[in-house]
Every structure is written in structure tokens, then in C-alpha cells.
Amino acid sequence: MFESIIKKVNNFDFSNIKLAIVYGGEFEESDISRMSFFSVAKNLKEVDFAKIDAIEYTENIVNDLQKSNPNIVLNMMHGEFGEDGGLPTICEMLNIKYTHSGRLASGLGMRKDLCKLLFKANNIDVAKSITLTRSELNESNILDFLTKNNIEKSIVKPYDGGSSIGISICTTDNIDLSESLKSRSNGFLVEEFIDGDEFFVPVLLDRAIDVIQVSTAEGFYDYHNKYNAESKSRHIFPAKIPADVLEKMKNFAEIAHKVIDCKTLSRSDFIYSESTNRFVMSEINTHPGFTPKSLFPEVCNHYGVDFETLIKIIIYDGYFG
């Protein structure tokens, strides 16, 4: 599937490339960013590049980038600053090339509520939902959403967050918003809860690769099930869903990637209910994780793209794309 780009990357001389990897900071998803950074640093050979500077985000990021003077920045930030378009904006200001999506696509991709509008406009199925501000996020409004839509259960999440941080599951009998209110977000997406496994579609260079399924022993695919070493969540590949559903997910992932104007890579997330044979798209991720448990590199590896090659593809496309 990716023989051509792998050949180009293998033949390219990276020894002339000064690379800066930006990661970390003091944000809600900074720990995940550090996990991704350490995985990348472990798999990239410093001897292959002119130099590799590891830059952890601080308020001095502009000066740090100017001092490094890289040919390209590998954006390993998750959530605030990196994934919301902040780092791409600074790179453009400094005339430095960078990986992943541009500032507008990144900013849009972070807003789950706005993405849903675009998905619906492009005939991609989504769950029923409303958007609430922090001041509107209360028991009365959740109950009103549930009763008006004849829904028994909802999922509440920050509309501009990731890594399953700030998630609350609410029913008509139990509305506990404490987890969501721990988030720093000022807005929240309240969605109909679809009972089923979660499915993820990595898109690389505008092509949906395949679908991977995640089944959790308990609860949903939250922060613990994603990143905790003791998690009993199972990655199922190939996904166990009907062939027509699988193809629709891949098609929707490619459409979403193009509609948001993503660059190089993205990951689209779906929920499928086997009992009703219904699936919905929940969100798009313009900066998929690269931790040891992350889904994007796992799927790529099944198609002959190992971790190091995948990172070099991302750098190569950012440099020449």
C-alpha cells in the first residue's frame, strides 16, 4: 500500500535535516505528549540526522526554536498549543516547516462540536448531541437533553479536548458531572451514548489504512484503558464487523480527513452497536498518539510500515509537502 513513499523515504538523505521535536508543556495532555516523544526518540537514530533537538514547551518556545533553527519541527504536542494550531502558527511566523496539519485544520479538528456539523453536512452519521458552556453544564440541562430525545444515557466530554480526559457518563437516574468539570475546557459536547465497541481508522497520506477495534473489559475506552499498563482493553485487528460497515468507516474517515483539510495523517473514531447494526463517527484526531499502546503505529505496522519508517514518512511529507 505504501511501497512508493517507503522507497522515497529510504532513499532520502536525512543527514542534512536539522530536526526539532517539540513536546510536553503543562497542559492536560502533556503526559501523553511526553509518552509519544519518548517513543519517537527511542525509535529515531540521531546519526541519521544533522541534529535532533528535543524542545519541551515553555513560555520561551519562540526563543528556543530560533536558537535551534531547525529545518523542520516534529510536532509531538497533544491537546493545547500543539494540536489546536498554536505550534503551527508559531512555526509559520518563524518560517519553519512542521509536521502534521496546519493551524486552521488543527484548530478545527480540536472542536468536536464544529467537526460534527461538517460531518453531518457530508452525510457522515453522528450521534444526537448538544453543546453547552461550562456555566450551562448542569443536571437540569443534561436531563432535559435526555428526556427531549428519549435517550437513557449520554456521554459528556470537553468539546476541545482529547485523550479521553474529562469524560462523564450520565443517565436519567445518575447525573454526575464531576469528571467533566475537572477539565479546563469552557465548552462541552453532550452526546447520545451508543453502546458498543470503538473503532479507529488511521489515514495516512489521504488513504484510510484499515479499521482497528478496541474492546474494554469494563467501562469505555477512557484514559485508564488507553494508557495504563494494567488496562485489560483489547486491540482487535482486523476489526470484527461486517465488510460493508468496515468500508463505510474507511470512506467516512477519508472524507473527514479531506473536509477538515488534514495533512499527512489523521485518525477517525467510530462507535458501532452490533445489536442495532448502527455506527456513528465520534471525532477526528489530527495528532494521533505515538505511545507504545497507540493505535496508529500499530495499524501501520500491520501494513509493513514500522515505527521508525512511519515517523520518517511524517517528517518527509512535512518537509516536501
Image (tube, rainbow, N blue to C red):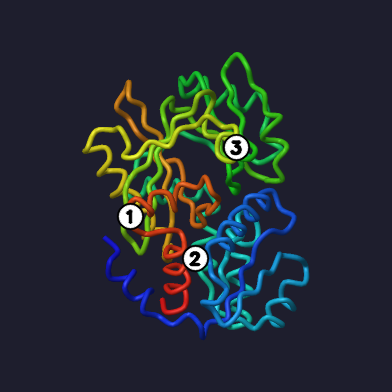
Disc 2 versus disc 3: nearer the observer: 3
Q: Quadrant of residue 271?
A: top left
Tell me how many marks there are. Answer: 3
Tell me which numbered mark, 2 or 3, is placed earlier along the sequence: 2
Q: Mark 2 points at which residue?
A: 100
Dot 1 corresponds to which residue? 254
Q: Residue at the spot x=38%, y=53% of the render?
A: 301
| Circle 3: residue type | Ala
Depth check, mark 3 against mark 1: the one in front is: 3
Check contact, mark 2 vs mark 3: CB within 8 A.
no
Residue 149 at x, y percent in the picture: 46, 24
Q: Earlier in the sequence, mark 2 or mark 1?
A: 2
- Residue annotated with mark 3: 229
| Image quarter of residue 80 | bottom right
What amino acid type is highlighted by mark number 1?
A: Glu
Whether 41 is drawn above or below 191: the answer is below
* Secondary structure state at the residue bearing disc 2: loop
Q: Is residue 278 left or right of residue 50?
A: left
